[in-house]
Amino acid sequence: MKNFLVKIIKLTLFTIFVLVLSLFFVPDKVSETSILAALKDKNELLGKTPSPKIILVGGSNVSFGMDSKKLEKRYRMPVVNTGLHGGLGMEFMLNHIKPYVQKGDVLILMPEYEYFYTDNFYGEMELVSVIFDVEPESKKIISTEQWSHLLKYLPVYSAKKIKNYASSLFQKSADVIDIYHRNSFNSYGDACLHWNLPNQSYLPAPALKGNEKVNAKSIQFLKEFKLYVKNKGAGLLIFPPVIDKTSFDNQKIIIEKIAEELKNNDLTFFTKPSAYRYEDSLFFNSYYHLNKKGVDKRTEQLIRDLD
């Protein structure tokens, strides 16, 4: 029995050793061309775009839901769509953008609702991919609470890297540019390859119990970010995300709680959340991803609201 336990311990330690090595030293070929790698391109775009500029911020409801060219034409200001993936979390998303905020800039934040009542605020597997393979230097902006939250994703991500690397040794990867490819964005940062594609089936956001609570951490963080933006001489406008009708109705109670909590903390949504509750037919493959008709409607509505 003792020998068996020793073998189990050795095997466990060896497995941990391999996973740690993979996490830091095994290259992830998939991340080089995935949608997450577009973070580098959006950083470059932010860095070279002169101020004053409009910066669109959010997860995939922003990346898959705007026509920035129309905004630029209307306000005669350069527009950068920094939206990428909700799995990066709002904390990383806003901390990451801080160095690019300059005097005169206008930040339009359209955060997914999950940031306010789930741990998505801290990020998910996608953030692990970014901080270990896409942009390793961004580890320095990860808070202690984020690391604590992300720990559960590390073993799975490490094993995934080993699998991807092994596959790359035997299979030549076809660099197909699909809607989740690094090069699926236009010059403004809008995801646009799906604009001419038919809708795909997807599941709406699940119905909630109604007893969910707004995460005080997300509200406090947003208050601090708003102050940071103000001190930089820039402006912050918070809009509700666009979401399909079915999902909105399933989560109406928590959405109303979020709106109320933001209002109580001087972070009021620029307009009522129901204003961006769209028909399901305007969504491409997710309750946050608009098709081209939906993109046009949302962009035009945003312009009317800003006007």
Image (cartoon, rainbow, N blue to C red):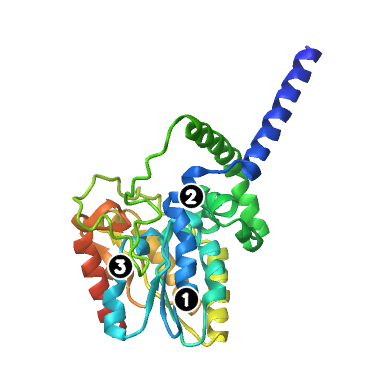
Q: What distance separates the C-alpha of mark 1 from that of mark 2?
A: 22 Å
Assign the N terminus to one quadrant of the image: top right
- Residue type marked 3: Met
Labels 2 and 3 touching (C-beta < 8 A): no
Residue marked by disc 1: 48
Assign the C terminus to one quadrant of the image: bottom left
Determine which quarter of the picture holds residue 140. bottom right
Residue marked by disc 3: 66
Q: What distance separates the C-alpha of mark 2 from that of mark 3?
A: 25 Å
Residue marked by disc 2: 32
The secondary element bearing badge 3 is classed as: loop
Sequence-wise first label, 2 or 3: 2
Disc 2 crowd, CA 10 A, few/some/many (<14, 14-19, 20+): some
Front in this rendered view, residue 44 or 23: 44
Image height of 233 relative to 213, above or below? below
Labels 1 and 3 touching (C-beta < 8 A): no
Residue farthest toward the right in the current orientation of the protein: 2
Give the side of residue 286 with respect to residue 147, left or right.
left
Give the side of residue 106 with respect to residue 7, left or right.
left
Res. 116 visible in picture: no
Q: Residue at x 48, y 35 (%)?
A: 168
- Residue type marked 1: Lys
Sequence-wise first label, 1 or 3: 1
Give the side of residue 177 with respect to residue 14, left or right.
left
Front in this rendered view, residue 156 or 146: 156
The secondary element bearing badge 1 is classed as: helix
Q: Residue at x 45, y 66 (%)?
A: 42
Q: Nearer the viewer, mark 1 or mark 3?
A: 1
